[in-house]
Amino acid sequence: MGEVDPAFIQDPEHRPKLSPIEATGIPVIDLSPIINKAVENSSAIEALVKEIGSACKEWGFFQVINHGVPLTLRQRLEEASREFFAQSMEDKRKVNRDETTLTGYYDTEHTKNVRDWKEVFDFFAKEPTLLPLSSDEHDHRIHHWTNQSPQYPPNFRVIIQEYIEEVQKLGYKLLELIALSLGLEANRFEEFFIKHQTSFVRLNHYPPCPYPDLALGVGRHKDGGALTILAQDEVGGLEVKRKTDQEWVGVKPTPDAYIINVGDIIQVWSNDAYESVEHRVMVNTEKERFSIPFFFNPAHDAEVKPLEELINEHNNPAKYRPYKWGKFLIHRRDTNFKKHVVENLQIYHYKIK
Ligand SMILES: O=C(O)CCC(=O)C(=O)O
Ligand SMILES: [Fe+2]
């Protein structure tokens, strides 16, 4: 790829700085008070809830340690991901994502209409996963989607499923802490997920790029779901738009930590108390990078709107009109493959002005 392919080139104002600011202050939160149940300590839990609330408010991003997901499981999936992407293109394309499969391998994702310098493999947490067949609001057909299973590496499916089991537990715990931090019942969000969550794991591979000053591994975006639980490797490259000054700052890799970010749905549920923060991924000329986000998403029929308990007609009216998560997700997926002239669906399209 010596020639610069224009599909990957960011507009000048969105190009990365090659020596980014390293973020100091992105909170690292120790979850041991809720993971180590033997020592139930309510004041430690209370302090944790406060810490989570401030992190969501001030950053929209934080890292967690002592999170309960076994490191060996993460390492096995990281290894499987390396093995999968190291195959020939022909082999990877055997599990290609297309209109009829929704998950699987692909390398043509566009973010904000510019192609990302990456290849990915997507895998739903639930099998089957129920989602609308189309984004048309009058089309009520629901499709039951299944996953594609690569033949190689062996046990790929078992490894990814075991990982999902564990990371999902972490997801529910984080939702509880976030609910408590908003003054809600701990299990307030559970009903949206428990039956038919539409979560998925994505394996990301960012190959070295000959023009890291022009392209991005993933262009600037906000995650559309509820919560993202991200494992990044030691290479680094994830940048977050700092809320205090709108500067792009790098998230330094912390071994065995997960990076958590608030997605658009929590922003809407909380009526903007917590905001989904913009982020992007830089690439470099020498090192390939791997990351594994788990996108924790509610059921397709979850109606996303500011929660009753958090709004008040007089001094905090609802800032969003309700929308159906499944329709939103399918609309997004339909528009991620090609370059379009306009921006795809965003939560601000539902904003009450
Ligand atoms: O690779 C990363 O660090 C982040 C990827 C990301 O933001 C995404 O896939 O939504
Ligand atoms: Fe993201």
Image (tube, rainbow, N blue to C red):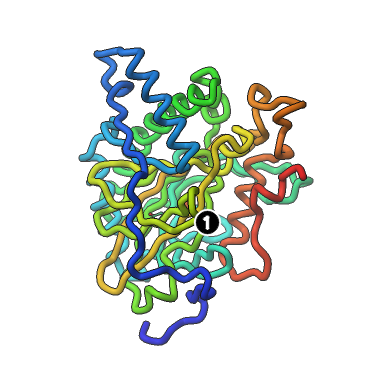
Is residue 229 positioned above or below 84 on the image?
Answer: above
Residue 69 appearing in the image = yes
Q: Residue furthest bottom?
A: 3
Residue 95 appearing in the image = no
| Residue highlighted by disc 1 | 221
Q: How many marks?
A: 1
Is residue 152 positioned above or below 190 on the image?
Answer: below
Q: Which percent across, then down, holds residue 64?
A: 33, 36
The quadrant in which residue 131 appears is top right
Which quadrant holds the N terminus?
A: bottom left
Tell me the residue at 50%/73% (across/down).
Answer: 10
Q: Which percent across, then down, holds residue 54?
A: 45, 33
- Horizontal arrangement in the rendering, residue 302 relative to residue 36 (left or right): right
The quadrant in which residue 35 appears is top left
Tell me the residue at 74%/50% (across/down).
Answer: 136
**Disc 1 element:** strand
Tell me the residue at 65%/42% (across/down).
Answer: 142
Name the residue nearer the viewer: 226 or 145.
226
From the Cβ of disc 1, is ligand 2 less than 8 Å away? yes
Is residue 149 positioned above or below 191 on the image?
Answer: below
Q: Which percent across, then down, holds residue 81?
A: 30, 55
Is residue 335 positioned above or below 302 on the image?
Answer: below
Q: Residue furthest front?
A: 245
Name the residue nearer the viewer: 116 or 219.
219
- Horizontal arrangement in the rendering, residue 284 relative to residue 52 (left or right): left
Amino acid type, label 1? His
